[in-house]
Amino acid sequence: MEPAARRRGTLLVCAASVLPLASCYTSIGKWTYPSGHYRTTESPHPAPAFVLVEPFLDLRGIDNTSYMPWSYVPLFPLGWNHFDRPEATVPSSDTTQFRADPDIDLPRALVAELRRSRLVDRAEFAGDFNGGRGETHVLRGRLRSFFLDESRITYGLSIYAPVMWALALPMGSSTNGFCVDLELAERQSGRVVWQARIAETNEHVEGFYYGPEWYRFSPMWERRLREKLGSLATTLGGEAAPLPPELLRDLEETPPAGVVEHPGVDAAPK
């Protein structure tokens, strides 16, 4: 075989082995609840209340920006994304592909948690239920953030970066974060009897052979929600459900966010 033909054959083999690795960077996610990470536990004494949960008021920002094309520029080391609304991006190999409707999915998950943990006598989602049927309390939420930040490290090698990923160097990082303010009000008087902020920011380095799933919203929401709902149950005259050991361990290892990132359109002082 001619030396030139041999070199072309070698390049073709390398390209064929490298390009499938690049596809591994593209990640697809879908909201589910419960997350499956934690066992179900039940309250020994549910609160004598009927809680109606309303869709959340969406106060998120609208900055959906991708700088991933920079990762293809030779000698430039990386690309990155920031999505205030990750479910609203145009899917491609360079943008997130996460299917969710946070202002609906999060309150539905809240109803599911009230039911499966038996924290109250009855819980319904307002989108599925007409009000004025005996509910004692209404639970509302303000969705301030539900964001995704991603980076892709290419080491200045452009489309050949998967060679470095295959050698166990980091592919990049992923950050998931959210912030929701909740309030529970009496149906008749409108008096607010319980308030809570549920927030977490979770960042990880991602590699070809290591790192968690790119989209961790569901287990993050479950652990923070279950941490807070015990106080709602006691406010209503019931008892909190005991938290399983694996959930307690994760709560100890992942403290709540001290500063809320990207806190929404009404965060600036008026």
Image (spheres, rainbow, N blue to C red):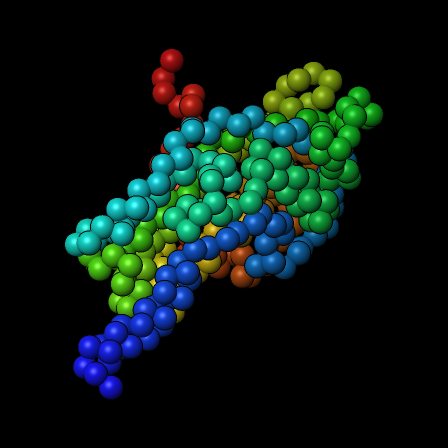
Percent from the top left, x then y, of residue 78? 25, 51
Front residue of 3/266: it is 3
For the point 40% across and 66% down, which residue is it?
20
Figure label count: 0
- Residue 163: quarter of image: bottom left
Q: Determine whether, in the image, residue 225 is placed left or right of residue 173.
A: right
Residue pushed farthest left? 75
Nearer the observer, 267 or 12: 12
User: Which picture quadrant has residue 234?
Assistant: top right
Query: Residue 136 location in percent, x, y?
Result: 75, 27
Residue that appears at 27% across and 62% down: 161
Q: Can residue 214 be seen? A: yes
Residue 43 showing in the rendered view: no
- Look at 61% across and 27% down and name the residue there: 140
Reply above or below: 188 against 176: above
Instruction: From the top left corner, tell me how far across and down residue 104 is, in percent.
Output: 62, 35
